[in-house]
Amino acid sequence: MNTDFITDAMLDDWRRQGFLVVRGVYDAARMVEITKWVDDIQHWPETAGRHMMYFENSSSDPSARLLNRVENFVAYHDRMAGLFDSELRGACSRLFGEEAVLFKEKINFKLPGGGGFEAHQDAQAGWETYAPLYITATVIVDPATVENGCLELAHWDHRKALVGDLWEPLEGDQLAGVEFVPCPAEPGDVLFFDSYLPHRSAPNMTNDPRRVLYVTYNKASDGDHREQYYADKRASYPPDIERQADKEYAYRV
């Protein structure tokens, strides 16, 4: 696996700040392929017991139902599975200092009118149940701008610890000393951040989508938890098509 794009200087930055922004990991030709795969998945039908599709109401037109994200799809898309087992896993292995294993994967679509995400740490979603530390690699599919809700990453005194409560957005004193800096990015760029880095994003109020692949890994020495994670998530927060009309669901993992 080619990890040459993670330099020693980048490793120093990673240890200090808990994130990296690596420009141009994938060239235009490769992004044509990756974008086609994202297009394919975006148009899959909702299917119970398979990939997991979640929807939201548009912030600009509450009557419109928008695809928010798709998870648990690598078993049904060989090309994506290959992508996640190549440079991305190799890069995360280098950042961990040991072999990485896939924990979860999703595409956040943030279509026009799609909502934002409040400030949070990924570890707040109960991930410590499975392993103590994760790295997420985000592959930028469409241009990510301030206007369409690009990621905003915390510049702070980085530490690998929870500063917020489980399943609640960060707020008030929990954000003392945190400066959120927007990170506009182009297709083919990859952003890496660990599971304790606070981040957020704004709604997409433009006419263009802001699709991003989120691929999360943990250390192989901490175990392979992907299958159990998705079993737990399907039980506690199933995709829309699997929900019972008279039941309320609370996001847990």
Image (spheres, grey):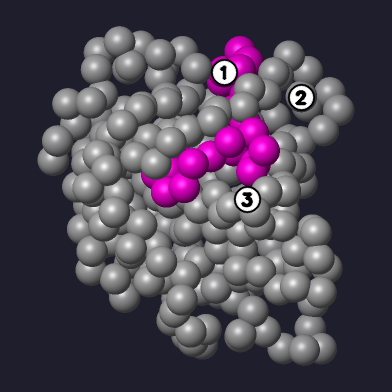
Element class at badge 2: helix
Of the image marks 2 and 3, the number of the one nearer the N terminus: 3
Q: Nearer the viewer, residue 53 or 237?
A: 53
Question: Which picture quadrant has residue 21?
Answer: top left
Q: Is residue 122 toward the left or the right of residue 114 in the image?
A: left
**Looking at the figure, which quarter contains the C terminus?**
bottom right
Q: What residue is shown at x 28% (from left), y 34% (from top)?
A: 25
**Whether label 1 touches label 2, CB < 8 Å:** no
Q: Nearer the viewer, mark 2 or mark 3?
A: 2
The image position of residue 13, as x and y in percent, is: 40, 13
| Picture residue at 42% right of the left edge, 57% below the top | 105
Q: Is residue 49 visible?
A: yes
Give the labeled residue for mark 3: 125
Q: Residue furthest left?
A: 1
* Mark 1 vs mark 3, CA separation in Å: 19 Å
Residue under the image location 25 percent in, 39 percent down: 27
Q: Give the residue displayed 48% in from the left and 65% down from the top.
A: 71
Q: Amino acid at mark 1?
A: His
Q: Is residue 137 visible?
A: no
Q: Which mark is residue 175?
A: 2
Q: Is residue 207 magenta?
A: no
Q: Which residue, given by chain and number where applicable, does mark 1 sit on?
A: 158
